[in-house]
Amino acid sequence: MKNHIKVNGKLLQSNKRFSQLKQSQKEWIAIELNTLYHSKMKEKRTTRKLPATHRDKVISSLYEKIQKREIWIPYSEIENYAFSKITKITKSFKKNYPKLSAEIEAEHLKKKE
């Protein structure tokens, strides 16, 4: 039982991997990461990857939501999963919000001039 800890009377696996979650939990996490990351991109008016501080805030808020749903997984696993999906999420932003992304790109071009 070296890989288990007892929290609130429940026995939890301390070295759980993202792949060991149920499919519904994985899907919920993916959707939630997308919505949080896209909303932060809208807030910061960018179509590119977020800076480290904002990215970490997104990951932290995602982890808080995961804990509220009582899904137990180490923070490092969520962090690794988020890092692996960030490029895909930034590309999907342009597909999901074409008008907004074109508007933001135009703003960036004006700033450079």
Image (cartoon, grey):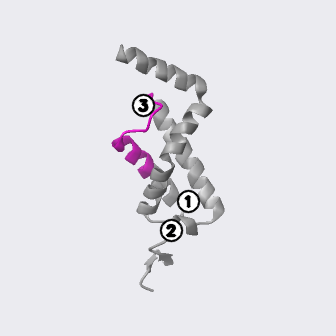
Q: Please state which of the two labelled residues, at mark 1 or mark 2, is closer to the viewer.
A: 2
Determine the residue located farthest toward the right in the rendered image.
Answer: 24
Is residue 51 among the parts visible in the rendering?
yes
Instruction: Give the residue number, with chain letter if any, for mark 2.
Output: 17
- Of residue 7 and residue 43, the one placed in the foreground of this image is 43
- Of residue 100 and residue 85, the one placed in the foreground of this image is 85
- Is residue 49 positioned above or below 70 on the image? above
Disc number for residue 56: none
Q: Label 3: few (<14), some or many (≥20) within 10 Å? A: few
Q: Element at badge 1?
A: loop
Q: Quadrant of the C terminus?
A: top left
Q: Amino acid at mark 2?
A: Arg
Instruction: Give the residue number, with chain letter if any, for mark 3.
Output: 44
Q: Amino acid at mark 3?
A: Lys
Residue 52 is a magenta residue: yes
What residue is at 56 percent from the left and 48 percent from the top? 32
- Of residue 20 and residue 94, the one placed in the foreground of this image is 94
Q: Please state which of the two labelled residues, at mark 2 or mark 3, is closer to the viewer.
A: 2
In the image, which residues are magenta? 45-60
